[in-house]
Image: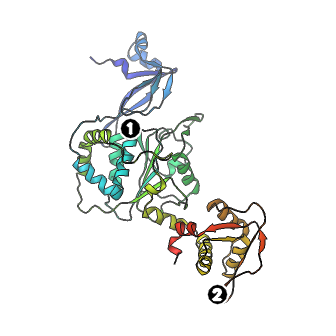
Amino acid sequence: MIDRSKQYLRIGTTYYKIVQFPSLNGQLVEVLIRWDKNTIIQDHNRNYLGKIPKYDGSVCYPNHINFSKEIKGFYNTYSQLKYKPIKGEIENTLKFFNHIFGEQIEIGLDYLKILYEYPLQILPILCLVSNERATGKSTFLKYLKEVFSNNMSYLDSHSLNSNFNLDWGNKLILGLDEAFFQKEEIIERIKYLSTSDKNKIEAKGKEKIEVEFFGKFIMCSNKEDNFIKIDADEIRFWVRKVPKIIVDDIDLLNKLTNEIPAFLYFILNRKFANERKTRMWFTRKQIYTPALAKLIKNSRNKLESEIASILITIIDKFELDEVKFTTDDILSVLLKRRFLTNSNELRKLLKVKWKLPIADNSLSYKKFYFHSDGDITMATISSKARYFTITKEFLKENFDELMS
């Protein structure tokens, strides 16, 4: 006989009913709906209220291995996974993940192991990109939705730009399909949240509340060249270009779904190939890819490329390891090339974006002069100024395509 009192909860002073919400794919998703106390009495009786479980409040605590709906008198709003680890075959799953992660398959399997075993661990923003269709990017998101169920939410630019985030503010995975971001504030919010352990939850008509945040962003995009702007020193993005699936399998998602229990068993018993080395587990070098380099290159404005070209020309001609210069030095060359800018814009780029060191005091250095005939000369007499210093190594790392 079903204990119908378990259909209801009292969290604080508010009553809720646990209902199975039918989704469009035919599955049932467990959700809490506020329920009037008098309605419960009307449907049952007043004595029935005493049988309803009571909690001091609610908390969202992710745990996939030792899950509990009650955490020290608080109701856990995190959803229990519907799949349990069971030993079995995972041929289709491993083949699919080899397709998605390629030469970085061990990092990919580590990433999935962390999601399952250490959901509170900060992870890089995973971006799967390709200009081609039928690559498996969307299937990857659908697979994760099947594994983590109600603990994953699909987002779009509107969701991230909205003040109201009750529906996704406490999810483990935040999936963005067909991602393309033009507003700088949305990009900055994603970057901030990816390394933050706090978030403010807000619903219509309710005050903002600060909660612990453990969400991981996973993006898919068909605009592999420019779906987001990324700075050269960015360490939060893991961008993979996914190739087209050669043989299309319309039943692939079902095959992957059937293997979920066996895959959970596999990653639970698999040892990490890469131990934690940074706050985001992986180093920048480990997750660096040509796809990320391409995004960084396309994120630069013309001013950056022009300044880099000027400095590379100096380094190449005089065979230097570093160049000392002021904003006025660069500005004079840019004006000769009819490239319009100003000292404030230059200084902001060099100091804030490139993070170049600047001399504490006015020190001696030798200027370089660009002449109308294309020749470059070095001053024989030193000048004094608070100059910037840029190294050949920095230019090679960030503007390799301009190096000869």
Amino acid type, label 2: Gly
Task: First in sequence, mark 1 or 2: give its number.
Answer: 1
Cα separation between marks 1 and 2: 61 Å
From where the camera sits, is residue 223 visible? no
According to the picture, the residue beneath numbered tag 2 turns out to be: 374
Q: Could you tell me which residue is drawn at 66 percent across and 90 percent down?
A: 373
Q: Where's residue 379, x and y in %? A: 73, 80
The answer to whether residue 234 is above or below residue 41 is: below
Q: Which mark is residue 117?
A: 1
Q: Could you tell me which residue is drawn at 58 percent across and 57 percent down?
A: 184
Determine the secondary structure under disc 2. loop
Q: Where's residue 12, x and y in %? A: 52, 21
Q: Nearer the viewer, residue 373 or 11?
A: 373
From where the camera sits, is residue 241 visible? yes
Amino acid type, label 1: Glu
The quarter of the picture where residue 1 lies is top left
